[in-house]
Image (cartoon, helix red, strand yellow):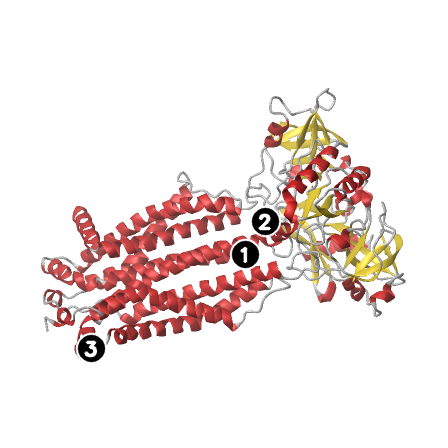
Amino acid sequence: MIRNYLITTLRNLTRNATNTVINVVGLSLGIGCAIILFLLAAYSNSYNTFEDNYDRIYRLVNSSDGQGGQRDYTTGVPTPLPYVLKEELSDVEQIAHVRDHYEEMMFTVNPDSQSPQYFELRDRRLAFTENSYFYIFTKKWLAGDKSTALLKPGSTVISESVAKQLFPNGNALGQSVIFNKTYELVIDGIVSNQPENSDMPHEIFISLKTLDEKIEDGSWGSVSSNDQCYMLFPEGVVPTESFQERIMAIRSKFVDNDNNSLYEVQPMSDLHFNEKWSNLTYDSITRDQLMVIVIVAIFLLITACINFVNLSTAIAVKRSKEVGIRKVLGGTKKQLALQFLSEAFFIVLISVIVGIGISELILIYLNPFLEINLDISFSDITFLGLLGAGTLIITFLAGFYPSLVLSGFKPALALKNKITNKHAGGISLRKGLVVFQFFISQVFIMGTLIVLFQMDYLKERDLGFSKDAIIHTRIPEPNVNKHKTLKTELAKLAGVEEVSTMFSPPSSGSVAVSNFKFEDSPEDFYTAMKYADEDFLEIYDIQLLAGRNIQQSDTLNEVVVNEKLLKYVGFEGTPRDAIGKQMKIYGKNVPIVGVMKDFHSVSLHDELMTITLFSEARSYRAVAIKVNMASFKSTNDKIKQAWKSLYPEYDYEYEFYDKQLQEFYESEQQLATVFSFFSGIAIIVGCLGLFGLASFMTNQKVKEIGVRKTLGATVMSIVGMFSVSFLKLIIIAFVFAVPLTWYALNHWLQNFQYRIDISPQFYAIGLVATVFVAMLTVGYKSIKAATANPVQCLRDE
């Protein structure tokens, strides 16, 4: 019987080759894209799960009253806090202070030899931390002793890949190196490489005791997101609100809580998904975004199954005699249903194979675009099990209804050729399925439009400073004399218009925040600190509203503030009235010498910040160079030559500032691109389903069309009849698509302080686009039916 099923299946599939190809294409696209999306969702959901203590690790995070009634969220803690908590919280198993280092990393190997080797590790991450780190996070030790690592100044642990890079021909354990030409280190341990799906990306670990400053006695008023605190709780212990109150009580011994600061413990399971607190990889995805990925995958599969149903029932009449003969010869309804299900299974099986090929092809381009490493593993039992189960489920979804319809034909009617399309399942059901497809297509079209318009808005919005024709390069060493010389030499070059040295540009992901007091107010305020020289305002065209610019200085002695800061502290005078007012920062009273116009110092996800600009030469880590673009290549060669003359051991690299700013929205841009691609696939698959319904409706109305033409109906009137039918379906789908699109996209736009309004034009464009695509799809079938010879349609009457 199975052999009979197989022969009959192959015969019917080849006989209806066009429909078979359409079914296979639709299902293959749906299955292939769904595989990719499920892989992406599974990969995102797997972050940090490899940690042995995954359910016991927590990070200390902080929120406080910000400007404009907003809450500010930071992952940073005051540097003394982890050390105080170790003394006070005896019920916590381990506590580790982790200081992320994102600046230059130059390692000198064989420093005592006549020919030392210099390794600049640009793509590595380094953390200053302590021994407890290795008892919190999972590391496989390849060499060295975990119990003694990072206990002494200079103690260092590196990953296997870093060890091979620094010592390709020998054992790294016990070797001495110099870090950034300053710190003498000894490699006391080598650990396994960090998995890609980790939010703890560090590959180099240096004892915190190595740093010159005494961190445990540091400032309570300044917080950097680079200083983070991680805790390991005992088995079965979950921190409660009372535990967080204990932390607040400990902190209150050292600092007032004027800004309603609140410390919370964030579980590691939340690190990769929380939209309020970032992680160390700056690569997160919200739970909502993860849900969108899964929903899109499910919609693609459902849309592909709807196509199969519509196409299979559209050709049901052609197989009525086959069903009648089989039933007369003793075939049961169950046997016929199995026959048609086997045909569906065969198509689904082919589609799964083709879909896997499509997904492999997509991964070739998707992996480098998203900078991940997704792959389809046929040795993964879980994947194979899910693929097999998915194949059966899709077979059932796509084949059950057509098999039920076809096997239900009455043999008497079938053999007399009395089976019509009204016996081949309800037209209302098929219309409902196509309405659902139109609904999906319109949600995708309108959603993609809104996302793309928001991305364009972010690119075009005035940030309050100039970003064009400015390149940034780094200052690799904290040597004040060298970077002053660099600035002088660069300013002399033809093609260089302006030069400025600074810690970071006007808008940057690196934000240093400090508390301050204004005049005689006892209240603590907070401000973002910008360290830069006297040319900072000019090179970025930042307008000075009152007073004068800062003057070059090696230490803090005067400041320029922005308008937002004056409003924040409640100053009611004009910017000119603020000149000469005193601010107490870092324990030092300094005058305000200028007020600058507000500019965006962080991404447009957040509102304008208070900013304090001052000169502090020892903190500069970057140089901005405004160049004449007409002679950029030759000018850049000269810049490189001047830079290398001062820093010969380092690689010269530069980046245009406008490109740097785009990185703020890289994840959203990637999401928009991926969403647009899969939306396009969903629309294509939907068009195939629309083609199926058009086939069904033209088959159903073939005699009606013949009669209308005989009575004088024109081709256009008949095409219009079909068009009106589909237009009604589009309108119904549109009514349902609008509220869902508004809710979902409005929720997504809440992530941006500065965003577009969802205006009726987006809905209008979505509706017009859907109508256009639908008319193109049904046009072929409707015109073909309208131009057919009516004699052929009516000759058996």
Q: Amino acid at mark 3?
A: Arg
Query: Is residue 331 at least partly visible in the picture?
Result: yes
The amino acid marked with disc number 2 is Asp
| Picture mark count | 3
Residue at 42%, 58% in the rendered image? 680
Distance from the alpha carbon under mark 2 to that under mark 1:
13 Å
Q: Quadrant of residue 240?
A: bottom right
Q: Residues within 10 Å of mark 3 (few under 14, many from 20)?
A: some
- Mark nearer the N terminus (2 vs 3): 2
User: Helix, strand or loop at disc 1?
Assistant: helix
Circle 1/circle 3 CB separation < 8 Å: no
Q: Residues under labels 2 and 3: Cα distance?
A: 62 Å
Q: Where on the picture, by quarter, is residue 143? A: top right
Along the viewing direction, whichever of 480 and 319 lies nearer the viewer: 480
Residue 287 disc label: 1
Q: Is residue 658 left or right of residue 707?
A: right
Badge 3 marks a residue whose secondary structure is: helix
Question: At label 1, which amino acid type do we have?
Answer: Arg
- Residue occupying image coordinates x 25% and y 57%: 19
Where is residue 244 drawn, in percent x and y? 71, 55
For the residues carrying marks 1 and 3, which lies nearer the camera in this image? 3
Please tell me which of labels 1 and 3 falls first in the chain. 1
- What residue does disc 2 label? 283
> What residue did someone put label 3 on?
708
**Up-down: is 115 above or below 615?**
above
